[in-house]
Amino acid sequence: MTKQRFQKVFIVVMVLIFLPTIFPIFGLANRVEPLVLGFPFAFFWVVLWIVIAFSALLVLYYFDPEK
Amino acid sequence: MANWQVALGIMSAYLVIAMAIGILAGRGRDKASLSEFATAGRGLGLIVMWFLMGGAVFSAFSFLGAPGWAFAQGAPAFYILTYTAFAILPWYILAPKINAIGKKHNLYSLVGFFFGRYRMKSLSVLVGAIAVFAFIQYLATQMTGMAIIFNVMTEGRVPIWLGALAAYGIVVVYVATGGLRAAAWSDVFQGALMIIIAWTVGLTIVFQLHDSPAQMFEGIARDNPGFLQIGVEGSNMSPMAYVTVILVSIIGFIMWPHLFSKSYVTEPRTAKKTVLAYPLFALFLIPLLLAGFAAVGVVQAGDVDTPDNILPYLITTVMNLPGWLYGLVGAGALAAAMSSADAITHSASLEFHDGVVKTIKGDIPEATTVTIMRVLVVVIGALAYCVTIFGGQGLVALLLGAYGSIVQFAPGVYGALYWRRVTPVAIISGLIVGTVLNYFFQLSGIVVPFDIHPGIAGLAANILVVVAVSYATKPQEKAIVDSYVDASLDSSYLATESEPEPAYR
């Protein structure tokens, strides 16, 4: 993968993972029930996307041509 | 021994260790070297780098402010997690490019970065002034946090002025002597301590006051409908305010000069790995939010002077905890505040030097530059101390206020790196419009239409002005533009002497 192409993929993937944490998509998760692992659903949702972002970063770094 | 004596003992021991690490880190290095003082020789490793960048989010704001937000605001506190996890991401792309430019032009500050591309002295002064002003506000936040902790944990026996002086005095001493390396190694110790303490104390509070997180949240949802949601009846923030406070924090994050300039001090590969590991910091903050939620319904809003005091209040007043735990929370909060304060004080001296001293005086020998920077560390420290003792607002309002102005650097930074057509006059016009607008909305208390964050409103105006003025003015000299936009880590780029003239004489 070239450097330019990697940067484009990186930006697109990260924006897609970020968007669910803000409105309007966050509106889908903006509620208390059901509690997940004791957390309100909105709280769990934010944490979930952070964990996804972390995992995606690990995968992307593996494919980074300039690492 | 009384609880407060144990707490005071532990916090004092912590301060001694922090000071020892800071001073030892800088020992045996070249005291007259600008590269050592400003960038630690451009070679910090991953662990050190991670904690150095992490110190920025693990501040008094997260240790005291995050529980405060959870307690007083509810769901809007989730924004702290979101921005902590995502704000670092642009650095993955930006750091290698800025690093290459820094190596070629021998830069160590944000002001130097602006001057290298835009070659405009008034812009350098303006950027330096805004940065230092925001830094002083930020430092005041940290110092207030340190002072509150000392005061509350010793049950009022250490007055505010003394607590701030003791903790911040130590920061000034080790930064002035050891430069960036001292700040970095102190941050490793302080960061590790803070993470351990946040988890132990946060979970202890939840399980002592409530049987489980689930019961706690069910109770909150039952007694305060809407509190755990955003933009519904009973919640404390509208969706637009929530989105724009996240955006302003994320865009502004890397514009903070103490974070921006870390692009210079580490190899791009280390910078990328730092980004990888960074979202973990957001997860480390979770127990601090839980501690704040645990106080809802247990503590009445009127019982604490400000929501920021909720964590110390829980420990000392509501719960029956041993004195050593007082001390640990105190040490953790001090560590949080000090690990932000050291990097900021260090950076403030560099930015003020480049923005004002270098711009006015021009050619200064290297050894003198380092001496001036050491003196500036002390002067800026003293200034921030005075603001803390004689000023005074809520922690979060201060930080967000400063953030609002820093985010106005974004068009200048992204323009310098990616847009050939952008011109110096456009950048300074945009910066002025954005900053003035932001301050107008923040000081006048007039709410921006649609509940948009003042920083984002300023940024929108800023970008419009930059684009319009750029096309109305003459493009910059091609060689200068190329040396930024085409920057890469290729040996050919770093070796070529295409630069028309050095950024500084």
Image: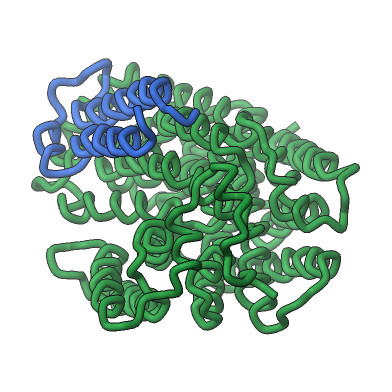
Chain colours: A blue, B green
Q: Is residue B313 visible?
A: no
Q: Is residue B62 left or right of residue B145?
A: left
Residue at screen point 48% across, 59% down: B484
Q: In screen coordinates, is B295 left or right of B48?
A: left
Q: Is residue B302 above or below residue A64?
A: below
- x and y, in percent, of residue B173 in the image: 80, 55
For the point 64% across and 46% down, the residue is B265
Q: Quadrant of the C terminus of chain B?
A: bottom right
Image position, residue B458 (x, y; %)? 29, 70
Image quarter for residue B291? top left
Q: Position of residue B424 (x, y in %)?
A: 42, 77
State which quarter of the image contains the N terminus of chain B.
top right
Q: Residue at x 45, y 50 (%)?
A: B308
- Residue B426 seen in the figure: yes
Between A54 and B117, which is closer to the camera in this rendering? Answer: B117
Return the residue nearer the eye: B100 or B178.
B100
Residue at x 42%, y 75% (from the top left corner) = B476
Residue B48: x, y in percent?
65, 34
Total of numbered circles in the picture? 0
Location of residue A7 (image quadrant):
top left
